[in-house]
Image (cartoon, rainbow, N blue to C red):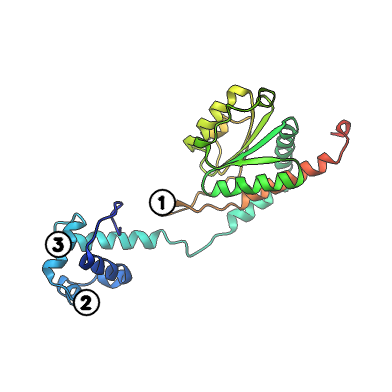
Amino acid sequence: MLFLEETLDLQSTDLYIYNYICRNLNSVIYMRIRELSLATNVSTTTILRFCKKFHCSGYSEFKFRLQEYVTHKSLTSLEHYDESSNIAFLNYLQKSEFDDKLMAAASLIRKSDLLFFIGLGGSGIAANYGSYLFSSLVSFSSAITDPLNTPLYHLNECFRSRICLVALSISGEQEDIIEFIDNLKQYDASVISITNKGNTSLERFSDLNICCHMPQKTYYSMDVSSLIPAIAILEMLAHKMHALKQLPDSDV
């Protein structure tokens, strides 16, 4: 709530003050206590009690913390979208270095009998898309977006050593995914990771890493990094696999 991480149980009068402040942030930060009390039709004493509920000693501290909150909010604004990093990555897709990685990933997938895509948050959306794409163009696959509640220990033993997992992670440091892969490694599964940066924990757990070299972007606590690179890799890999599938095994 405003500059507090916790949620307060506000009574009707306090809630009215809170809603007024939220709707008029840019003007409230310049108001004196008397002005705010007139604007909300409550006494200055009620305003002071309201401030104390926000763990402030008085109105001056509340207004100072509110100003910091408004400043931080403006600094985290994403009004300007910079497409240059996406363009640079799409140019990288044309290089032989990337094509070599694409072929190496395709080789790992071709050796598997069971293909999974794993991701959380935005990467979970990409994992679902990857599963849909490969199921449509290559062979059945499944997405895992809740690794803690998706155990694989009931898998038939004949599949356990022929699993390929495509792990999508912007940071490459998500503990839930790394723990899932660590458990999966006991079955000698292959792991392909797609990350936004190199030298991550996920890369070290992978047989092959495709790094996008993209900046990570956050808005408050939300990760809003671009999914364009991950989607592009999945699409190119799926179409590469589809083309290879049409060839006799001896030609691959």
Q: Report which residue position mark 1 lands on.
A: 221
- As helix, strand or loop, the secondary structure at mark 3 comes to helix
Q: Please tell me the numbered disc located at residue 39.
A: 2
The answer to whether residue 214 shows anywhere in this view is no
- CA gap, disc 2 and disc 1: 32 Å
The x, y position of residue 144, in whole percent, is 58, 40
Give the mark count.
3
- CA gap, disc 3 and disc 1: 29 Å
Q: Please tell me the numbered disc located at residue 19.
A: none
The x, y position of residue 98, in whole percent, is 70, 42
Determine the residue positioned at 29% across, 68% down.
19
The x, y position of residue 77, in whole percent, is 43, 61
Name above or below for residue 80 compared with residue 159: below
Instruction: Tell me the amino acid under the disc marked 3.
Output: Arg
Relative depth, front residue between 151 and 109: 151
Name above or below for residue 226 compared with residue 31: above
- As helix, strand or loop, the secondary structure at mark 2 comes to helix
- CA gap, disc 3 and disc 2: 16 Å
Q: Please tell me the numbered disc located at residue 49.
A: 3
- Rate crowding at label 3 as few (under 14), some (14 to 19) or many (20 or more) other CA atoms within 10 Å: some
Residue 183 lies in quadrant = top right
Query: Is mark 3 in CB contact (under 8 Å) with mark 2?
Result: no
- As helix, strand or loop, the secondary structure at mark 1 comes to loop
Mark 3 / mark 2, whichever is N-terminal: 2
The x, y position of residue 43, in whole percent, is 13, 72
Instruction: Tell me the amino acid under the disc marked 1.
Output: Ser
Name above or below for residue 220 compared with residue 143: below
Q: Residue furthest left?
A: 45
The answer to whether residue 17 shows anywhere in this view is yes
Q: Is residue 98 left or right of residue 70?
A: right
Mark 2 / mark 1, whichever is N-terminal: 2
